[in-house]
Amino acid sequence: MPAEAQALSIIEYPHPVLRHKCKPIRRVDGDLRAVVREMFALMYEAKGIGLAASQVGLPFRLFVSNLSGEADKGEELVFINPVVSLPKGNEEAEEGCLSLPGLYAPIRRPARVHISAYSLDGQEIAADLEGLAARCVQHETDHLDGVLFIDRLAEAAALEIREKLYDLEDRFEARVGRGEMPSKEQSDRRVAEFEEKYC
Ligand code: ZN
């Protein structure tokens, strides 16, 4: 079975694909639209407000978001090739991540940013964001560069969550053992296929 025919799932820390530097998307087709629908479904199921392609093992620059976290509320947005710029101010707030289940920590980020990107229909997106929206697009764009929110923790907070990271590493090993997470080889194959097709 080709890797792309396998269902997507949310990849958890410390799977190496979460560190992949995603490449720009050069084309959109029906299969990519299906991937986006699946990403929204996975995000809602896991009660998240954003999900980046690398979190489902895909190697391109795309993330989905709905700040309401609910399928029948809020606004579903797809960001292709997002660029975050013009950071202003800074603000600390608690963050979590679907790839680090159960882990929450205070993260300091610019309070306001500008984002530019393309929608699934090729329309340009340009917006000045603040609050949760600004935090969400920064967190998700970080994922596309292989950066996780734990990389941005202050030193004291990083020490505090160390035990929880060990627990996540144990959980991950167990899930790989049960075949619930793709192996590095399966993941590398999918990355190569999708890069060839879309990047
Ligand atoms: Zn995340």
Image: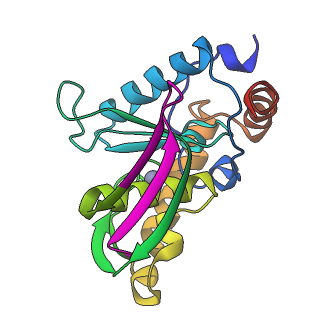
- Visible in this render: residue 96? no
Image quadrant in which you'd find residue 78 = top left
Which part of the image, by quadrant, shows the N terminus? Answer: top right
Residue that lies at the very extreme toward the bottom in this rendered image: 156
Residue depicted at 49% across the width and 75% down the height:
152
Q: Is 141 contained in the magenta span?
A: no
Work out whether residue 168 or residue 104 is closer to the camera in this orientation and state it: 104
Image quadrant in which you'd find residue 89 = bottom left
In the image, residue 67 sits, relative to residue 128, either above or below, namely above
Give how far across and how far down residue 51 sits, in percent. Answer: 44, 42
Q: In the rendered view, how is the structure colored?
A: rainbow
In the image, residue 148 sits, relative to residue 174, either above or below, namely below
In the image, residue 8 sits, relative to residue 54, either above or below, namely above
In the image, residue 60 sits, relative to residue 15, either above or below, namely above
Magenta region's main secondary structure? strand
**Magenta stretch bounds:** 109-127
